[in-house]
Image (cartoon, rainbow, N blue to C red):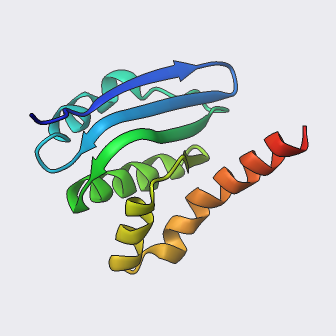
Amino acid sequence: MKNQLQWRTQQNNESLIVELMGEFTRDTLLPLWNQRDSFLHPEANQHIYWDLKHLVKIDSAGFTLLTELLHHYQKRHSNCVINAPEKLKALADLFDLSDWFSQFIYCERKKNDGIENN
C-alpha cells in the first residue's frame, strides 16, 4: 500500500517548520503543490525549515518540487532543509545540483553545530 505524502507546519515568531512525511513522489506530490498557498504563509522575518526526517521515499519528481519550493521561497525568506535523507543528496548529485543544493543543507550543519555547542 502506498504511503501517501503528509505534511504539518509549526510556526513561531522566528520560524515556519514544514514537516514532510511519507512518500514524496510523482504519485503523491500533487496535493502538496495544490495546497501550498493554504499553509505556506511565512512572515517577512521568518526562516523556513523543511524537515524531511519522516520521508520514507523521494523520487526525481519530489526532488524537483522541493527544489522549486526552495528556489521560490529563497527570494523572500531564508530557508533550509533539515534531516535531509541520503537519497535527496544523491538526486542533487545526479542532476548536478549539489553545489546549489548545499546552500540549503549548510544551515542544517550550522544549526546542528549550534545545538551541540549549547
Q: How many marks?
A: 0
Left or right of residue 113: residue 18 = left
Left or right of residue 31: residue 76 = right
Quadrant the N terminus occupies: top left
Q: Residue 106, percent across and down?
A: 65, 60
Q: Nearer the viewer, residue 105 or 46?
A: 105
Q: What residue sits 83% from the left and 44% below the top?
A: 116
Q: What residue sits 28% from the left and 49% below the top?
A: 57
Q: From the viewer's perspective, is residue 21 above or below residue 52?
A: above
Q: Residue 78, percent across and down?
A: 61, 47
Q: From the viewer's perspective, is residue 94 above or below residue 104?
A: below
Q: What residue sits 64% from the left and 18% below the top?
A: 12
Q: Residue 37, percent across and down?
A: 32, 28
Residue farthest right in this picture: 118
Q: Nearer the viewer, residue 117 or 7?
A: 117
Residue farthest front in this picture: 1
Quadrant the C terminus occupies: top right
Q: Residue 104, percent across and down?
A: 57, 57
Q: What residue sits 31% from the left and 58% below the top?
A: 63
Q: From the viewer's perspective, is residue 1 above or below residue 90?
A: above
Q: Does residue 95 appear anywhere in the picture?
A: no
Q: Does residue 32 appear anywhere in the picture?
A: yes
